[in-house]
Amino acid sequence: MRKLFLGATAYFLTIVCSFAQSPAQDTTAYQSRKLKLDQIDLVSSYYKQDGNNSAVLGGIGTEMLTDFANTITLSFLKTDSRNRQHTFGLDMGIDHYTSASSDSIDPATVSSASYSDNRYYPTLSWGMRDEARKYAVGAGASISTEYDYFSRGAFVSISKFSEDKNRELGLKLHVFLDTWTVIYPVELRGFDTPAGRVENPDAHGKKPRNSYNASLSWLQVVNKRFQVAFLADVVYQSGQLGTLYQRVYFTDGTHSVERLPDSRFKLPLGIRANYFLGDKFIFRGYYRFYTDDWGITANTFDLEIPYKVTPFVSISPFYRFSTQTASDYFAPYRQHQKTEEFYTSDYDLSDFTSHFGGVNLRFNSANGILGIRKLNTVELRYGHYNRSTGLNANIITLVASLK
């Protein structure tokens, strides 16, 4: 699969190079524009959840978790001798989370290494837009690391838009190459034998997990009030897809670690539509259909209605409804048979419906906000999530943009 991806990437870059070849232009009137810092985006959010279906404990017990996430994005601009605009992005993200269920991996300890951890995820990106030839390209790379996980990612993208900019076709290829440190529940890290306890050889080492995504989009401006986008993704994953510190309990009371296939194919399809009702209202609708070869089928409906209170203030209530069927490999606590090849009690793979609703408040001014001239946008967003399995969560997000 990696060879296939690299071959597709090489073909894609060939297309990019062919687009980039253009006739020589007269640049005598051109004045080179130096690279400049164009915008700074700061995002900070606090997320808290609770429930009673911990996958670490085999589908029972607390799901209490908190996550404090912060990201900063620096965007740089430069125009080259062909008047093509180049955008360079530098993102740095840091999350700090606590998880009561992860602490149950080794309940004998005061606090296991997975109870509280930090995740770091920097990203570098580049984009180029050529208005004369009506296309844009981009590329980027990222890493993400925490206590038991390390990920490397890369992407390339290309889009072609019409002369009047009312249509745009886009393609993006993304790969993630991940490595998991094997962590078993403490009681499954060895076996008791007549000669004494013996270490479990499977409870050590590292495991790979790779993901390959291809995203296709078609954006269409129907008229001055109505815009629509069609979205399709093809996702293939391989490697260690089960989480080895999540327990599964069988009908006879014995238990093991989660076992799932070493490959997964996902197919999400979506449509997004925006309708501008006068100068004050926008209706933003979204529908997504999802299916995979693990037996899950899901439907998601999303609606957000921004209302412009003043030219500088808007309020946007939003609501999302989702429903999904259970994976072929899911069963609750003590309902799996030991004869099954694959098994999980992770309620993320169960049958459920969910609701997510809230409101977004946005302030925007070219002259600055709170006396800070460069601060032109501030957003405050709150959302509440609940799932039919009993999981509840709240998230609050603050966004600030300086330009």
Image (cartoon, rainbow, N blue to C red):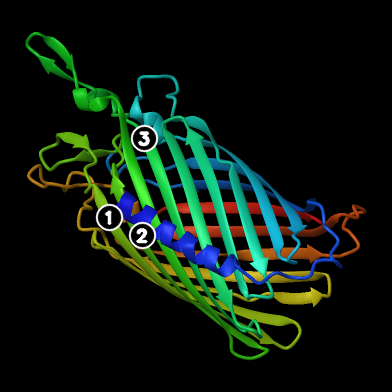
Sooner in the amino-acid sequence: mark 1 or mark 2: 2
Image check: 83 left or right of 106?
right
Q: Amino acid at mark 3?
A: Trp
Q: Are marks 3 and 1 in contact (CB under 8 Å)?
A: no
Give the percent coordinates (x, y) of residue 19: 56, 69
Q: Are marks 1 and 2 in contact (CB under 8 Å)?
A: yes
Image check: 53 left or right of 271?
left
Q: Secondary structure at mark 2?
A: strand
Farthest top residue? 195
Q: Which residue is mark 2?
A: 235
Q: Residues within 10 Å of mark 1 (few under 14, many from 20)?
A: some
Q: Which residue is mark 1?
A: 264
Q: Secondary structure at mark 1?
A: strand
Residue at 60 percent of width and 64 percent of height: 358
Give the percent coordinates (x, y) of residue 330: 23, 53
Residue 230 in sight here: yes
Tag shown at residue 129:
none
Q: Residues within 10 Å of mark 3 (few under 14, many from 20)?
A: many
Q: Which residue is mark 3?
A: 180
Q: Amino acid at mark 2?
A: Val
Residue 62 in sight here: no
